[in-house]
Amino acid sequence: MGNTPAVCRKCYLHPDVINSYLDGTLVETLKKRAENEWKHRLRQLQPEEAAVLGLLQQRLAAEKRRQMPLRKVLQRSISRVKKRRSVISTKSWLSPGAKTAAKTAAVM
């Protein structure tokens, strides 16, 4: 790729970081750290600020309950791509113009 060693060091992500992101443990770890830090800072908030923070935390929790796990989203995405590719490859008997139209339709 032509990257210098400095760029490689700066952009490197340890495989465990990626794996913990994919299995959801990274988010939980960061959430626990943030909660511990906020416990000490909450005493310094004005009542209005604490109310807004509570509202945002409730919205975040509701959003998290509605979300599909990342692994499932990725699996669904991959299966859709594979399905599109198989549809396009089975239409090898089509003329070049029809193949282009089939590819365009599969992407949509």
Image (tube, rainbow, N blue to C red):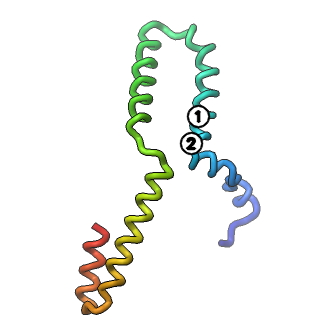
- Residue 49's image quarter? top left
Direction right: furthest residue: 5
User: Which residue occupies 74% across, 58% down?
Assistant: 6
Q: CA distance from mark 2 to mark 1?
A: 7 Å
Nearest the viewer among 5 and 90 is: 90
Nearest the viewer among 5 and 47 is: 47
Picture coordinates of residue 71 (x, y %)? 50, 52
Which amino acid type corresponds to the residue marked 1 in the rendered image? Glu
Picture coordinates of residue 76 (x, y %)? 41, 58
Which amino acid type corresponds to the residue marked 2 in the rendered image? Gly
Q: Are marks 2 and 1 in contact (CB under 8 Å)?
A: yes
Image height of 45 relative to 23, above or below: above
Look at the image and tell me in which quarter the N terminus lies. bottom right
Picture coordinates of residue 108 (x, y %)? 27, 67
Local crowd size for mark 1, using a 10 Å CA cut-off: few (<14), some (14–19), many (≥20): few
User: Which residue occupies 44% across, 35% down?
Assistant: 64
Local crowd size for mark 2, using a 10 Å CA cut-off: few (<14), some (14–19), many (≥20): some
Image height of 5 relative to 45, above or below: below
Picture coordinates of residue 42 (x, y %)? 56, 12
Residue 34 falls left or right of residue 10: left
Residue 63 falls left or right of residue 104: right
User: Which residue occupies 58% across, 30% down?
Assistant: 31
Q: Which residue is mark 2?
A: 24
- Residue 34's image quarter? top right
Image height of 2 relative to 93, above or below: above
Q: Which residue is mark 1?
A: 28
User: Which residue occupies 43% across, 30% down?
Assistant: 60
For the residue labelled by badge 2, is the local secondary structure a helix, a strand or a loop? loop
Identify the mark at residue 67; answer none if there is no mark.
none
For the residue labelled by badge 1, is the local secondary structure a helix, a strand or a loop? helix
Residue 75 falls left or right of residue 30: left
Nearest the viewer among 10 and 15 is: 15
